[in-house]
Image (cartoon, rainbow, N blue to C red):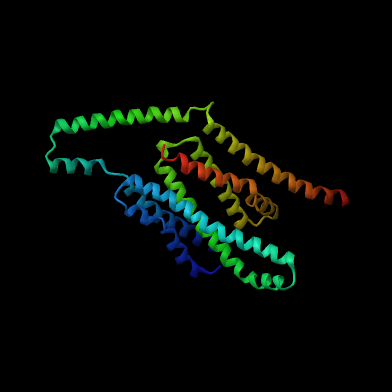
Amino acid sequence: MNFKILPIIFLLFLVPIPVFADDDAEDAVESLGWVAIGAGVVANLPFIVFNKWRRYAVRAGGQSLQMARQAVQFYKPVLNFHIILNSVGYFAGMTHGLLLVNHLDSISLSLAITMTVLMISGILLKYTSSRHTKIFNRLLHGQFGLVLLLIALIVLHVLTGDD
Amino acid sequence: MKALTLGLFLILTLSVVTVPTVFADEDEDDEYEDDEQRGFGETEREQAREQEREREDDEEDDDDEGLALGGGIPDAILYGTIAVIAGSVAYTGYKIYKAKRPQMKSS
């Protein structure tokens, strides 16, 4: 493993801190929630688009296949970006939730559970050496239903958050 | 060794990120120090404390209502979420089981 990347990871974890520069405490905590949503969008959208395009290019064959083969070298950096930014988003979201735990409702709890399930499956997918656990988590992490559920819960949480 | 280094790095990162969260909360003592500078007396401060306590009690009552289980759309969403997650885990397990069964039969 290349340890030169560690300072960059450390700096990325500091991304949510500027939200505390705001005077109003409640606004700061709310901003932390928006940081979590923003990090999630930036982390997942390019990764999903890249993977879909690669799969489509391999299936199409010909020149697209050549391009897909050349794009293999970018897979690891895109994956690392996906993991790091999702971790930032997860911890920002959980801090936002812990600071507003007095206003806990069923939608927020559902969102926290879904985020945790996806995060744990992602961590196990990346770091486990067991073949069976890896296959299981690969399938679970890419479940379309879970992604849809997460998006729906985020939208509901934003809509009901001010109540 | 690598795992230990990574673990220590993660703990350091999390502690650095967690520290600023304490500043997100307003300090009550600071508030009262400001009051003294502005000339608020003991009675006004007690009244303010009383009002704040009442407001907190009201909020707690509201929270209790929000957390009550057994009815309402939000609770249905929570149960639905748990059902979807359990379903996804079960479906994933079933998919792996189905993919392995023909291999077991052929061997």
Viewed as shown, does residue A157 lie left or right of A56? Answer: left
Residue A107 seen from this side: yes
Viewed as shown, does residue A11 lie left or right of A68? Answer: left
| Image spot of residue B72 (x, y percent) | 52, 28
Q: What residue is drawn where x is 86% and y is 48%? A: B105
Q: Quadrant of the N terminus of chain A?
A: bottom right
- Tell me the quarter of the picture where residue B66 sits: top left
Q: Name above or below for residue A68 compared with residue A42.
A: below
Q: How many numbered marks does the figure carry?
A: 0
Residue A86 seen from this side: no
Q: Quadrant of the C terminus of chain A?
A: top left
Q: Name above or below for residue B55 compared with residue A18.
A: above
| Image spot of residue A159 (x, y percent) | 47, 41
| Image spot of residue A83 (x, y percent) | 54, 58
Q: What residue is drawn where x is 71% and y is 73%? A: A63
Viewed as shown, does residue B61 lie left or right of A114? Answer: left
Q: Name above or below for residue B4 compared with residue B104.
A: below
Q: What residue is drawn where x is 45% and y is 37%? A: A104
| Image spot of residue A56 (x, y percent) | 69, 63
Q: What residue is drawn where x is 59% and y is 53%? A: A122
- Tell me the quarter of the picture where residue A17 sits: bottom left
